[in-house]
C-alpha cells in the first residue's frame, strides 16, 4: 500500500508540473513574460542545454596503430629522467606550443568557472520565476546570493573530485604502458582501469543528479546553504528510497522522450527551414524555444519535493501566485 501511495505521488507531481507549465506560459499568454522567463531558464541551464551527460570517447582503429602508439610512448619515456627530458626538448617549438596550450587551458578554466557561477545563481532565479509565476532577474539575483554562491562552491568541489579521478586514471594508464611489455596485457589493464574509475564517476554523476533535482529546491525553500540542504536530503532519501529510485527511472524515461522529440524537431526544422533552425540554435533563443520543456522539468522536481515534504509546499508555490 505504501508503494502504491508513492507511485500516486509521482503521478500527482507530473500532473502538477504540467498544470503549472500551462498556467505560467498560457494563462494568459504573454510574449514578454515568455522571453523574460526564457532568459532565467537560459541562465539556469548555461552550458548544459536541456540535459547533461558525461561522454567517454574511446579511440578506435587498427591493432597495428595501437601497437605503434604504445611503442612510441614507451620509447619516449624509457631511460633516465635526463634522457626523457632531452628527448622532450628536441621536439620543435615545444616552448611556444606549451605556452599556447597553457594559455588556452587557463582561459578555458576561467570561462568554465564564470559559467558555473552564473549557472548556479541562475538556478535560483529560474526557480523563483516558477515559484511566483512571474518573471524577474535582478530581485532574485540579489535575494539568493548566499544560496547561489554555496551551490557554486559545492559544484566546484565535485568538479575537482571528478578531475582528480580522471588524472589518476590517466597516470595509471601511462604507468602501465611504460612498465608492461605485452600489448594485449596493456590493453587489458587499461580497460580494467577505466572500469574501476568509471564506478566512482558514475556515483558522482548520480549524486549530482539528486543535488540538482532535490537539494536545489530544498535550498530555495529553506533559504539555506548546500551543506544544510544535503543533510535534509539525506533524511528524505533514506525515508523514501523506493520512491527516489522510481523518480530517477521516470526522469530517465522523460529525458529520453524529450531528447527524441527535440532531435526530431531539430531535424525537421533543418530540412524545412535552415534559417529558423539556425535562429533557435543560438544562445538564449534555444531556451526561449524550449521554455515549456525547461519549466516542466524544474516544476516536476519542485512538485515532487512538495509531495515528499508537504511543509515546503507554501515556500515552493505561494498561494497568492497560483489560481487555476
Image (cartoon, rainbow, N blue to C red):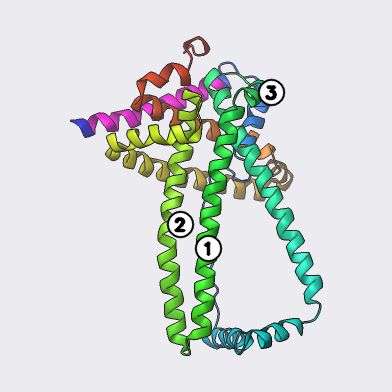
Query: According to the image, label 1 marks what residue?
Result: 166
| Residue 171 rendering spot, x and y as whole percentages | 53, 71
Which residue appears farthest toward the top when viewing the image? 320
Task: Please tell me whether mark 3 sits on a helix, a strand or a loop.
Answer: helix
Crowding at mark 1 (Cα within 10 Å: few <14, some 14-19, many 20+): some
Instruction: Find residue 124 and report its image quarter.
Output: top right
Q: What is the distance, in whole Å, between disc 2 and disc 3 at their CAs?
A: 36 Å
Q: Nearer the viewer, residue 82 or 61?
A: 82
Instruction: Residue 6: say if magenta.
Output: yes
Q: Is residue 296 above or below residue 314?
A: below
Principal secondary structure, stretch drawn in magenta? helix
Q: What is the distance, in whole Å, between disc 3 and disc 1 at their CAs?
A: 38 Å
Q: Nearer the viewer, residue 259 or 82?
A: 82
- Whichever of callouts 2 and 3 sits on the residue coming sooner in the sequence is 3
| Residue 138 rendering spot, x and y as whole percentages | 69, 23
| Residue 304 rendering spot, x and y as whole percentages | 39, 30
Task: Please tell me whether mark 1 sits on a helix, a strand or a loop.
Answer: helix
Q: What is the distance, in whole Å, between disc 2 and disc 1 at their CAs?
A: 9 Å
Left/right placement of residue 99 relative to residue 236 reads right
Q: Nearer the viewer, residue 246 or 86?
A: 86
Q: Residue at x 66, y 43 (%)?
A: 115
Crowding at mark 3 (Cα within 10 Å: few <14, some 14-19, many 20+): few
| Residue 141 rendering spot, x and y as whole percentages | 65, 26
Query: According to the image, label 3 marks what residue?
Result: 138
- Whichever of callouts 3 and 1 sits on the residue coming sooner in the sequence is 3
The nearer-to-camera label among 3 and 1 is: 1
Q: Which residues are magenta?
A: 4-24
Query: According to the image, label 2 marks what residue?
Result: 201
Tag 2 near tag 1, CB within 8 Å? yes
Q: Residue at x 38, y 42 (%)?
A: 248
Amino acid at each position: 500500500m505504501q508503494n502504491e501511495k508513492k507511485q500516486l505521488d509521482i503521478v500527482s507531481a507530473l500532473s502538477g508540473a504540467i498544470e503549472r507549465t500551462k498556467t505560467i506560459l498560457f494563462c494568459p499568454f504573454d510574449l514578454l513574460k515568455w522571453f523574460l522567463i526564457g532568459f532565467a531558464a537560459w541562465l539556469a541551464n548555461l552550458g548544459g542545454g536541456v540535459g547533461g551527460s558525461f561522454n567517454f570517447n574511446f579511440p578506435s582503429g587498427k591493432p597495428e596503430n595501437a601497437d605503434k602508439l604504445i611503442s612510441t610512448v614507451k620509447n619516449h619515456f624509457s631511460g633516465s629522467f635526463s634522457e626523457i627530458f632531452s628527448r622532450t626538448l628536441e621536439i620543435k617549438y615545444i616552448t611556444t606550443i606549451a605556452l599556447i596550450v597553457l594559455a588556452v587551458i587557463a582561459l578555458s578554466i576561467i570561462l568554465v568557472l564564470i559559467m558555473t557561477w552564473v549557472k548556479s545563481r541562475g538556478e535560483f532565479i529560474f526557480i523563483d520565476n516558477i515559484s511566483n509565476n512571474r518573471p524577474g532577474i535582478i530581485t532574485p539575483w540579489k535575494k539568493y546570493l548566499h544560496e547561489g554562491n554555496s551551490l557554486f562552491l559545492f559544484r566546484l568541489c565535485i568538479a575537482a573530485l571528478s578531475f582528480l579521478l580522471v588524472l589518476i586514471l590517466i597516470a595509471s594508464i601511462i604507468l602501465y604502458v611504460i612498465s608492461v611489455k605485452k600489448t594485449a596485457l596493456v590493453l587489458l589493464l587499461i580497460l580494467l582501469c577505466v572500469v574501476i574509475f568509471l564506478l566512482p564517476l558514475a556515483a558522482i554523476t548520480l549524486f549530482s543528479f539528486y543535488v540538482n533535482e532535490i537539494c536545489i529546491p530544498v535550498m530555495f525553500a529553506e533559504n539555506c546553504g548546500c551543506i544544510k540542504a544535503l543533510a535534509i536530503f539525506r533524511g528524505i532519501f533514506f525515508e523514501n528510497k523506493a520512491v527516489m529510485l522510481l523518480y530517477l527511472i521516470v526522469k530517465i524515461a522523460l529525458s529520453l522522450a524529450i531528447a527524441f522529440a527535440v532531435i526530431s524537431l531539430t531535424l525537421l526544422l533543418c530540412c524545412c527551414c535552415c534559417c529558423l533552425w539556425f535562429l533557435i540554435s543560438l544562445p538564449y533563443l534555444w531556451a526561449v524555444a524550449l521554455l515549456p520543456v525547461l519549466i516542466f522539468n524544474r516544476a516536476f522536481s519542485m512538485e515532487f519535493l512538495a509531495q515528499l515534504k508537504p511543509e515546503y509546499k507554501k515556500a515552493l508555490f505561494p498561494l497568492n501566485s497560483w489560481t487555476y
